[in-house]
Amino acid sequence: DTAVSQTPKYLVTQMGNDKSIKCEQNLGHDTMYWYKQDSKKFLKIMFSYNNKELIINETVPNRFSPKSPDKAHLNLHINSLELGDSAVYFCASSLGLSGGNTIYFGEGSWLTVV
Amino acid sequence: GESVGLHLPTLSVQEGDNSIINCAYSNSASDYFIWYKQESGKGPQFIIDIRSNMDKRQGQRVTVLLNKTVKHLSLQIAATQPGDSAVYFCAERGMDSSYKLIFGSGTRLLVRP
């Protein structure tokens, strides 16, 4: 059973399109995250949600809009895709926000914008 | 597929040798640190963590050392195996209300048979 699952794993799309990446965790965690990993492997947080409430919005362009319908799901919608959005996007979850809670990552979604 | 992290520092070790991966962290106020392992095509996987009130913690074949004076973290892997080949990231957790996890730039470990 995959603890944090995200779909699709691979996505190739044209500039200007709108796309979504879905994420679900079956760990019963309260906190979920989206991270972006660039071509140099640098991992940076984009958003975090705790019990469906936005906690971190790390100066991400407003073309990126996270949606948390319930605490087990955190979807990422991207409008008007740009070439620079090409990256690997990782969903993650943790028991809660407080320091010391291990963050569990999904397998990643490889987004290529052409 | 996965793009190659061409700019990643790389550590190459012989199978069976010990590996030491180093990391410098940025915030002297951070009080929780984690090492993650990322295999090709997969997400980061938790290896071991340490709180700032400790300077050493051991797991199975792995040891994390923390030197708060110089803001340095290291991961030691004993008897390195081919399955240890991956990119390793250190991360620090800030103590503001967001408890944001900040990742280091990563080190690629290559294990030679």
Image: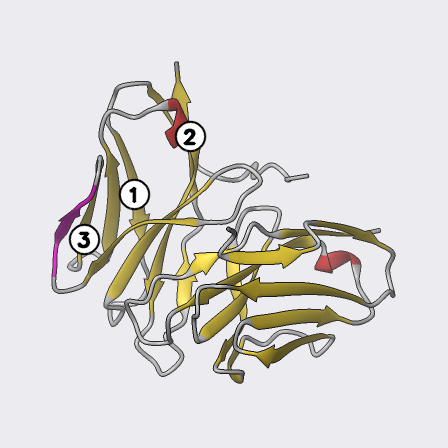
The residue wearing badge 3 is B66
Numbered disc 1: secondary structure: strand
Q: For mark 2, does the 10 Å Cα neighbourhood hold few (<14), some (14 to 19), or many (20 or more) residues?
A: many
Image quarter of residue A16: bottom right
Q: Is residue B19 above or below residue A62?
A: above
- Mark 3 and mark 2 lie on one chain; the one further toward the N terminus is 3
First-in-chain label (2 vs 1): 1
Residue bearing the label numbered 1:
B22
Residue A31 vs residue A61: left or right?
left
Marks 3 and 2, how far apart in space? 23 Å
Identify the mark at residue B85; answer none if there is no mark: 2
Q: Say few, some or many: other residues with alpha carbon within 10 Å of mark 3 (under 14 / 14 to 19 / 20 or more).
A: many
Answer above or below: position of B59 versus A34.
above
Counting from the top left corner in percent of width and height, residue B104 is at: 41, 54
Q: Residue B67: percent from the left, percent from the top? A: 16, 54
Q: Residue type at mark 1?
A: Asn
Q: Amino acid at mark 3?
A: Leu
Quarter of the image for residue A35 reads bottom right
Residues under labels 1 and 3: Cα distance? 10 Å
Q: Is residue B57 magenta?
A: yes
3 or 2: mark nearer the eye: 2
**Marks 1 & 3 on one chain:** yes
Q: Is residue B3 covered in magenta?
A: no
Residue contact at pointers 1 and 3, CB within 8 angstroms: no
Chain hosting mark 3? B
Q: Residue furthest front?
A: A1
Of all chains, the one bearing label 2 is: B
Q: Is residue B74 above or below residue B12?
A: below
Query: Which residue, as the protein is rendered here, is positioned at the far top?
Result: B113
Q: Residue at x 33, y 72 (%)?
A: B94
Region in magenta: B54-59
Q: Residue A20: x and y, percent? A: 74, 66
